Structures are given as structure tokens and as C-alpha cells.
Image (cartoon, coloured by chain):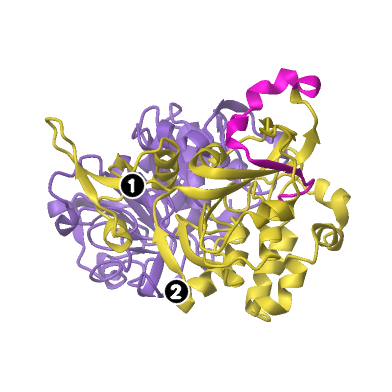
């Protein structure tokens, strides 16, 4: 049997973020989050809703990568033209995304790095839907390369998604739906269950120490009391992952495609 | 009242004056009225405020120095996530911007459509958007007293939209799996100019059974022109997919040579006929497979 890869472990960990979410639209942006959401739907949480990556709701998750255009079997329709009324502003969605930066408050950045609003040093995508996603529905994150350049000291350069920063609260604003769930990285799984929503390591991948994670993070992390090793996917999960990713796109997600067991 | 709204792309662009606010329909590399954008690129118009879910439309208008201000939530070509010409314009510091969330953006179009000064939203709270963009808050006058961001109306002087079909009077039919916010661009604009893949004289004589595809009513249409392949290189389902080869060439040119004037003939052309010809002609565009996500 071939070795389980770290990417497959991350997909398995990502699927856990969607466990028991109910009838919500599970959106995974990028191969690992998308495979994680699809794996969740095909295993422990069939009630999840998801799209084909475009605008049709499918009950059978669609494999990633090249395939025939009509391979999807639409069971419903969720176009962008009604995405905000149906999924985002109603809170009926859980997205797992990969921002360029995240800080200790869970504030995220996808807009620009360095410079100013008028003249950014490095322009990226723009805030996209992050402001609405974060104020209205649950969000989780995946980072393939855990480092202080991603988990930044201080605050992110441009706050594109709301987090738990008390200084960013306007009096009378309703922040009750800010709900940051899991962070899956190439080193560990974290949540925001620390004191005052501090980021907290809840499981370490095989062979990884807390010190190593802390070293790769620009701010202080907490460690959950019952921290354990991130579970490996079993044969059933691996088979589903392989069927959802027939072109093995997952092997290109984490640098050098390392095995899950550091050995 | 002229019910026959046929006009040429050049006549449409002639209605766009320096300093106007122009909304462009579609989304990223999908359903963009690129033939009309190319016609705009061939004109001398400048100092525009452009309002778009941006793709190459925004990138090339920025590259040509036609944009004074951009209202956006993203600019992207999907498979090429970062639009390189837009990046250059941003990093030069010469572009004024209002950056908003994707949902706030359509909310601003709806405010304009409903002739309201703004619509309230929670979106933007807890982020840098309000401070950077000068967005104000309002307080609910009801018992909850909630503080909300007032998303200003995105009033458009002109909207440009590419649709599947229209008749001479502007009765459009719009197909494809997702029509994005084209309806709201049309309703937010003082004048909306439509290009279409197929033009008919009277819609009721040709496609009455598909009247439900009439995404917005003809009172929101000021002019129509038939421009088959008019979304190229963006996708226009069900007719054709995006032309990723063309997008790659366009994106690559931002690095080498990196000078818009040196490459604009390739991506705009002297005329639409010449542009299409240099991209393999209508048959080649029609054969582009629909994108898979």
C-alpha cells in the first residue's frame, strides 16, 4: 500500500470541520478544502449542500480537475445571482478558504500586502466576498505552508475578513455571527477556543511539536489540554479522496508532497 | 419614441463621455461585453469611473489609462487568479479605488436601481473597508438600534452588457447557468447598451417559448447591436467557453514586454472583424469548450 500523504491527512482533517453542520452550503475553495467538504458529505455529513464549483447544487460531489462538462448531475441551482440572498446573508454556508495572511484575531487578508490603499506594494485578488462571509456565516481555513509570513505578527496588512479584534468593533454593530472554526495547516489543526478566542492548537500532525508550530507563527499560540495527534484517514476515506481527485491534483498542494508520517 | 434600438458599437461608445461612470456586466472571465469594451478601447474617452466584477475588461481599460477610479471587489481571470494589468495599475498608485465586498457591490447596484441613496448592510463591519473607502454607518431607527454600513448607490451613467439574444426593441433573452448581476447593472444605469450573440426582429415571432429568459425588461435597454463572439476571450455559455490561451497571452504580455502600447493591437485590434480574424475567426471561438470548475 502506498503511503498516506500529508495532503491526504489535511483533506481528512478539513472534512472534520464540516461534521454535523446541518443543511448548509459547504464551500471548499482550493483542492484540499474542496476535497475535504466533499469527503464530509460522502461520509459523516450527507446533509451538507454543495455546488459543482460553478452554480449547480449537486448531491454527488463533483471530482476536481479535467472531466466531461456534463458529468455533474444538478439537483439544484445556486448561481452567484442569488448567492448572497440564499447562502451568505442568511448564514447558511460554511466556507473553507486560504487567505494570504491571518493574524491572532482571525482577521484575514486577500486584498494587498504592503504599501497603502492608494498604492499597494503587492496587489492581490481584492477582498472578494470575505467581508460578507465573515460577518454572516462560519468560516474555516487551510494553509499549505504554515509560516510567520502567513500567520503574521501584529495585524494583517488589509483586514478583508472580520475576526475577533475588539478594536475593530463599532458600537451597536452586530458581530454575533462571526464564527471562525478550524484552521488546518501542513503542521497542525487549530481552532479559536483559547482565552478570548485566541488561536489554539488542538492536534499536531505526526512528528510535529508545538514548538515547531509556534516557531512558524508570528504570534503566541495556545495549546489545548487534550491535544493529540491528527488522525490519519482510513482506507475508506483514502478511496473516496482518490475517486474525487482522479488526476492527483492533491500531490501538488504541499511542497514536495511529503508523507503524513514523518518517520 | 424609437422602438428600433439598433445602433453600432461605435455609436454606443460615442455616448460615453470623459468622466462618466461605466458599469460592465459579467463576472471575472465570464460573460463580459468584451467587443463593446474593445470599441471603448479604440475611442479617446478617458477619466472613467469603472464599476465591475472585474476581469480583462478592467485590466485593459486600466492598462490603457482610461480609468480614473475603479469600484471593485476583485479583478481576476479565474485560472489566472491575479489580473496582471490591473496589478500594475494598482501598484503604480495612479488608480483611485473604492474596494467593496462582492455582496456589497450588488447591493450598491440595487440601491441605484431603486433610486435610493444607500442600502444598509452588516457587511464590511470588522474590516478595513469602511475606513479605507470612506463608507459611513447608519443606525436603525427601531428598537434594536443596530449600527450598519450604508452602502452607497452605485449609479451608472452607462452599463455595457453582452446577452445571448435580443430583438430590435431590446427584448433580451439571457441563458447560461449563471447570469451574475447583469440585471442590476441594467437597472442601475441611465443608459444600458447591449451586444448580443443573435439578433432577431421580433422576439415573439422567433422564441416566444423562452420568454422566461427575459432577464430585464426592454425599458432598461437603450441600444442593441449584434456581435457574435462578443464576449471573447471571456466565456458565454451555452455558445462558447473562455479562451484560456488568449488570456495567457494577454497575461504574459503584462510581463513581457509589459508595455500596453506595444501589445494593444493584439488584444484590441483595429476593428472587431480584424480582432476575431486574428483569434481564429468565429468558428474557432464557437468551438471553445465550456469551462469546468
Is the same chain shared between marks 1 and 2? no
Residue B215 seen from this side: no
Which quadrant of the figure has residue B270? bottom right
Q: From the viewer's perspective, is B150 left or right of A63?
A: left
Residue reaching furthest to the front: B1
Q: Residues within 10 Å of mark 2 (few under 14, many from 20)?
A: some
Give the purple chain's letter: A
Depth check: give the residue in front, B39 or A69. Answer: B39
Residue A109 in percent (x, y) is at 36, 61
Q: Which label is found at residue B287? A: none
Q: Secondary structure at mark 2?
A: strand
Residue A43 placement (x, y as % from top left): 47, 32
Q: Is residue B68 above or below residue A68?
A: below
Magenta stretch, residue numbers:
B204-233
Q: Is residue B206 magenta?
A: yes
Q: Looking at the picture, how far across and down is residue B248, in whole percent?
A: 69, 65
Name the quadrant of the C terminus of chain B.
Answer: top right
Identify the residue under disc 2: A122
The chain to which mark 1 is attached is B
At 68% from the left and 65% from the top, the residue drawn is B43
Q: Is residue B213 on the magenta stretch?
A: yes
- Determine if residue B85 is in view: yes
Q: Is residue A147 above or below residue A245?
A: below
Judging from the image, what secondary structure is the residue with disc 1 in?
A: strand
Q: Colour of chain B?
A: yellow
What residue lies at 26% left-to-right and 65% top-to-bottom? A210
Residue B146 picture location, percent across and down: 17, 39
Name the chain letter of the residue that bears numbered label 2: A
Residue with the mark numbered 1:
B151
Outermost residue, top direction?
B209
Amino acid at each position: 500500500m502506498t503511503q498516506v500523504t500529508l495532503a491526504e491527512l489535511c483533506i481528512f482533517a478539513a472534512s472534520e470541520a464540516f461534521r454535523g453542520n446541518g443543511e448548509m452550503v459547504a464551500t471548499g475553495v482550493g483542492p484540499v478544502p474542496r476535497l475535504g467538504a466533499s469527503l464530509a458529505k460522502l461520509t459523516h455529513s450527507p446533509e451538507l449542500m454543495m455546488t459543482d464549483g460553478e452554480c449547480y447544487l449537486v448531491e454527488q460531489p463533483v471530482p476536481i480537475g479535467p472531466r466531461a462538462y456534463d458529468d455533474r448531475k444538478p439537483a439544484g441551482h445556486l448561481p452567484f445571482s442569488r448567492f448572497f440572498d440564499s447562502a451568505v446573508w442568511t448564514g447558511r454556508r460554511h466556507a473553507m478558504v486560504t487567505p494570504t495572511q491571518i493574524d491572532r484575531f482571525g482577521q484575514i487578508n486577500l486584498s494587498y500586502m504592503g504599501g497603502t490603499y492608494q498604492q499597494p506594494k503587492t496587489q492581490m485578488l481584492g477582498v472578494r466576498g470575505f467581508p460578507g462571509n465573515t460577518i454572516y456565516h462560519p468560516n474555516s481555513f487551510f494553509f499549505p505552508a504554515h509560516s510567520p509570513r502567513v500567520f503574521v505578527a501584529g495585524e494583517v496588512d488589509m483586514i478583508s475578513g472580520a475576526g475577533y479584534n475588539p478594536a475593530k468593533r463599532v458600537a451597536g454593530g452586530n458581530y454575533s455571527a462571526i464564527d471562525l472554526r478550524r484552521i488546518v495547516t501542513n503542521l497542525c489543526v487549530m481552532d479559536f477556543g483559547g482565552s478570548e478566542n485566541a488561536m489554539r492548537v488542538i492536534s499536531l500532525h505526526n512528528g510535529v511539536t508545538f514548538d515547531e508550530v509556534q516557531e512558524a507563527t508570528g504570534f503566541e499560540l495556545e495549546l489545548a489540554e487534550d491535544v493529540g495527534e491528527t488522525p490519519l484517514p482510513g482506507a475508506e476515506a483514502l478511496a473516496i479522496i482518490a475517486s474525487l481527485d482522479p488526476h492527483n491534483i492533491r500531490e501538488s498542494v504541499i511542497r514536495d508532497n511529503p508523507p503524513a508520517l514523518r518517520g | 419614441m424609437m422602438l428600433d434600438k439598433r445602433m453600432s458599437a461605435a455609436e454606443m461608445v460615442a455616448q460615453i463621455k470623459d468622466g462618466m461612470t461605466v458599469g460592465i456586466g459579467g463576472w471575472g472571465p465570464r460573460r463580459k461585453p468584451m467587443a463593446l469594451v474593445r470599441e471603448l478601447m479604440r475611442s479617446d474617452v478617458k477619466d472613467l469611473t469603472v464599476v465591475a466584477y472585474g476581469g480583462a475588461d478592467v485590466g485593459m481599460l486600466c492598462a490603457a489609462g482610461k480609468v480614473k477610479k475603479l469600484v471593485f471587489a476583485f479583478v481576476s481571470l479565474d485560472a489566472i487568479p491575479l489580473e496582471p494589468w490591473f496589478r500594475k495599475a494598482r501598484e503604480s498608485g495612479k488608480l483611485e479605488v473604492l474596494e467593496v465586498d462582492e455582496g456589497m457591490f450588488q447591493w450598491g447596484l440595487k440601491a441605484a436601481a431603486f433610486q435610493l441613496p444607500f442600502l444598509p448592510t452588516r457587511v464590511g463591519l470588522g474590516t478595513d473597508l469602511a475606513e479605507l473607502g470612506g463608507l459611513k454607518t447608519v443606525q436603525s431607527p427601531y428598537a434594536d438600534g443596530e449600527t450598519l454600513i450604508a452602502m452607497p448607490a452605485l449609479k451608472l451613467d452607462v452599463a455595457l452588457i453582452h446577452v445571448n439574444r435580443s430583438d430590435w426593441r431590446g427584448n433580451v433573452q439571457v441563458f447560461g447557468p449563471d447570469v451574475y448581476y447583469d440585471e442590476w447593472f441594467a437597472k442601475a444605469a441611465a443608459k444600458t447598451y447591449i451586444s448580443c450573440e443573435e439578433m432577431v426582429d421580433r422576439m415573439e415571432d422567433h422564441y416566444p417559448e423562452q420568454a422566461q429568459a427575459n432577464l430585464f425588461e426592454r425599458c432598461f435597454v437603450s441600444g442593441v447591436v449584434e456581435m457574435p463572439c462578443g464576449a471573447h476571450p471571456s466565456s458565454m455559455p451555452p455558445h462558447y467557453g473562455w479562451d484560456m490561451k488568449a488570456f495567457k497571452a494577454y497575461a504574459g504580455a503584462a510581463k513581457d514586454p509589459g508595455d500596453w502600447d506595444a501589445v494593444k493591437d493584439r488584444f484590441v485590434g483595429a476593428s472587431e472583424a480584424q480582432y476575431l480574424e486574428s483569434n481564429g475567426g468565429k468558428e474557432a471561438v464557437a468551438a471553445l469548450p465550456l469551462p469546468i470548475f
